[in-house]
Image (cartoon, coloured by chain):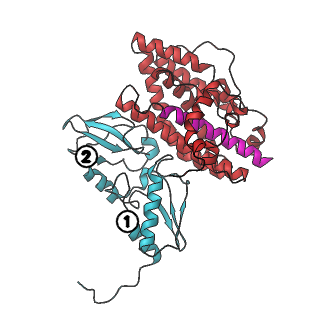
Chain colours: A red, B cyan
C-alpha cells in the first residue's frame, strides 16, 4: 500500500518535470532571442534532470524492474500523473512564460518543503533542485514584468497567455486521498498549505507587471489520476517515438 | 632526480585523489573533477561523486572518464557511487580551481554564503579585473554558467554561477 502510494507520488513529481522539460525543449532553436533559447533549454534540462531522479525513485518503489527510462518512454498517456498545466502547448513566448511563472513559483515552494521530507531520496532531490528552480522562477517573474509592462502587443499576448493558463493553477494545490497517507508520514507535502504564499508571490509580480489576475473560474483538473487534455498524447507521440519504434535501443 | 629515500607508499585514498586530479571536467577542461568538488569521498571500495546540476549532461561523461582513469591505474575494483546529498555547491570549488577558472576566462563564483549570493549578479571581469560588469543572460552555454559583459574592456565573459 505504502509502496503504491510512493510510486504514485514520485510519478506525479517526476511527470510534472518531465513533461514541462519536454515542452520547453520544443523551443530549442525557436526562441525570440539567443539568450532566451539558452534559458529555456537550460530550464528544460534542469527539469528533465529532476524527472530522472524522481522516476528512478518511482521505479525502485514499485520494484518491478522498471527504471526511469522505462517509465518515461514506455507508459501510455493514461498512466502519466502530471498536472494539466505542464502539458499545455507552448503557444507564443508570452504563453510559455505565463505557464512557467505559475509552475516555477509553485515548484520552488514545494521543493522548499520537500527538503524536509522523511523520504531521504525525495529530500535530497528537492534540496538539490530548489537552488535551480529559484533561477527558473526569477526568469519567469522578470519576463512577466517585461511583457506586461512592455508594449501594447506584448501586454495583450501575456494577458491572453495568462488567461489560458490560469484555469490549471488550482490543480497544483489539490490533495487527494491517494497522497494523504504520505502527508501524514511526512513523505509528501500538503500542497494546500502552499497556496497563500503562492498567491502572494503571484500577486506581487502581477502588480509590478501592471497586470490583473484573471477572474476566478472553475479550475480544471484530472491530471493526477491520468485524465489528461488531448495535448499530452501528441507530446508523447514525439517524445516516445524512438523507444516505440526501436524498443529498448540504447545510445 | 632520484630521491635518496623512497617515501612511504601513498595510501590508496591519496593515490586515487592524485589520479582524479588529472581527470578534467568535460565541459570546462581547465579544472579537474577534484577541484570542482565533484569527488566527495574515497574509501577502499568506492569513489563517491556528486553531480553539479541535476540535469547536467556532463555527469555521465564525468563518471565514464573517472572509470577509465581508475581502470588505467589498475583500480578496476573500485566502484563509483553517485550521491545527491548534501547537494553540490560552488563553495566546494578549491582555491586552485577558482584561479584556473579565472585564467581560463571564466569568472569564478564568490566564495562562501553561496545561498545568500544566489540572486546577486555583479561579477568581476576575468580579463581586466573590473567590477563594472553587467549580466547578459542568467543562463549560459552550460547549466553552471551565466553570460556577462565588461563595461570597461567591453569583452563578454562567462561566469560560474554561485550555487
Which type of secondary structure does the marked residue at label 2 adopt? Answer: loop
Residue linked to disc 1: B21
* Picture coordinates of residue A48, whole percent (x, y): 53, 42
- Point out the residue furthest to the right here: A1
Using the rendered view, name the quadrant where residue A177 is placed: top right
A20 falls in the magenta region? yes
Using the rendered view, name the quadrant where residue A103 is placed: top right
Q: Earlier in the sequence, mark 2 or mark 1?
A: 1
- Note whether residue A7 is visible: yes
Which type of secondary structure does the marked residue at label 1 adopt? Answer: loop
**Looking at the image, which is closer to me, A68 or A209?**
A68
**Looking at the image, which is closer to me, A138 or A156?**
A156
- Note whether residue A197 is visible: no
Residue linked to disc 2: B126
- Point out the residue furthest to the front here: A245
Q: CA distance from mark 2 to mark 1?
A: 24 Å
* Picture coordinates of residue B89, whole percent (x, y): 46, 51
* Picture coordinates of residue A200, whole percent (x, y): 57, 24
Question: Which numbered marker is on residue B144?
Answer: none
The residue depicted at 42 percent of the width and 11 percent of the height is: A153
Per the rendered image, the range of residues in magenta is A1-26
The residue depicted at 41 percent of the width and 83 percent of the height is: B9
Amino acid at each position: 500500500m505504502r509502496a503504491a502510494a510512493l510510486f504514485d507520488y514520485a510519478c506525479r513529481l517526476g511527470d510534472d518535470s518531465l513533461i514541462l522539460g519536454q515542452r520547453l525543449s520544443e523551443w530549442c532553436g525557436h526562441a525570440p532571442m539567443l539568450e532566451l533559447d539558452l534559458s529555456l533549454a537550460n530550464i528544460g534540462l534542469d527539469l528533465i534532470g529532476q524527472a530522472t531522479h524522481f522516476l528512478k525513485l518511482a521505479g525502485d518503489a514499485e520494484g518491478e524492474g522498471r527504471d526511469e527510462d522505462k517509465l518515461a518512454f514506455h507508459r501510455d498517456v493514461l498512466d502519466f500523473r502530471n498536472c494539466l498545466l505542464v502539458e499545455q502547448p507552448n503557444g507564443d513566448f508570452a504563453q510559455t512564460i505565463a505557464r512557467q511563472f505559475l509552475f516555477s513559483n509553485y515548484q520552488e515552494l514545494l521543493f522548499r518543503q520537500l527538503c524536509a521530507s522523511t523520504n531521504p531520496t525525495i529530500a535530497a532531490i528537492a534540496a538539490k533542485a530548489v537552488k535551480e528552480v529559484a533561477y527558473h522562477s526569477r526568469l519567469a517573474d522578470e519576463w512577466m514584468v517585461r511583457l506586461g509592462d512592455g508594449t501594447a502587443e506584448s501586454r495583450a499576448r501575456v494577458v491572453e497567455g495568462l488567461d489560458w493558463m490560469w484555469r490549471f493553477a488550482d490543480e497544483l494545490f489539490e490533495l487527494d486521498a491517494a497522497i494523504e497517507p504520505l502527508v501524514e508520514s511526512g513523505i509528501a507535502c500538503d500542497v494546500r498549505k502552499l497556496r497563500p504564499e503562492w498567491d502572494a508571490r503571484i500577486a506581487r509580480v502581477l502588480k509590478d507587471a501592471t497586470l490583473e489576475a484573471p477572474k476566478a473560474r472553475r479550475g480544471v483538473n484530472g491530471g493526477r489520476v491520468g485524465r489528461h487534455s488531448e495535448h499530452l498524447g501528441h507530446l508523447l507521440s514525439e517524445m516516445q517515438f524512438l523507444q516505440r519504434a526501436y524498443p529498448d535501443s540504447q545510445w | 632526480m632520484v630521491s635518496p629515500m623512497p617515501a612511504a607508499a601513498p595510501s590508496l585514498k591519496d593515490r586515487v585523489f592524485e589520479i582524479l586530479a588529472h581527470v578534467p571536467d568535460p565541459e570546462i577542461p581547465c579544472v579537474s573533477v577534484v577541484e570542482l568538488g565533484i569527488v566527495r569521498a574515497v574509501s577502499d571500495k568506492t569513489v563517491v561523486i556528486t553531480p553539479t546540476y541535476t540535469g547536467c549532461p556532463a555527469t555521465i561523461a564525468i563518471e565514464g572518464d573517472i572509470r577509465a582513469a581508475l581502470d588505467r591505474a589498475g583500480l578496476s575494483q573500485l566502484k563509483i557511487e553517485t550521491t545527491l546529498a548534501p547537494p553540490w555547491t560552488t563553495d566546494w570549488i578549491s582555491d586552485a580551481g577558482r584561479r584556473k577558472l579565472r585564467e581560463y576566462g571564466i569568472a569564478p563564483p564568490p566564495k562562501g554564503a553561496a545561498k545568500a549570493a544566489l540572486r546577486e549578479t555583479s561579477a568581476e571581469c576575468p580579463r581586466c579585473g573590473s567590477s563594472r560588469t553587467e549580466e547578459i543572460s542568467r543562463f549560459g552555454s552550460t547549466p553552471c554558467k551565466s553570460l556577462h559583459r565588461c563595461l570597461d574592456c567591453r569583452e563578454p565573459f562567462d561566469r560560474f554561477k554561485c550555487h
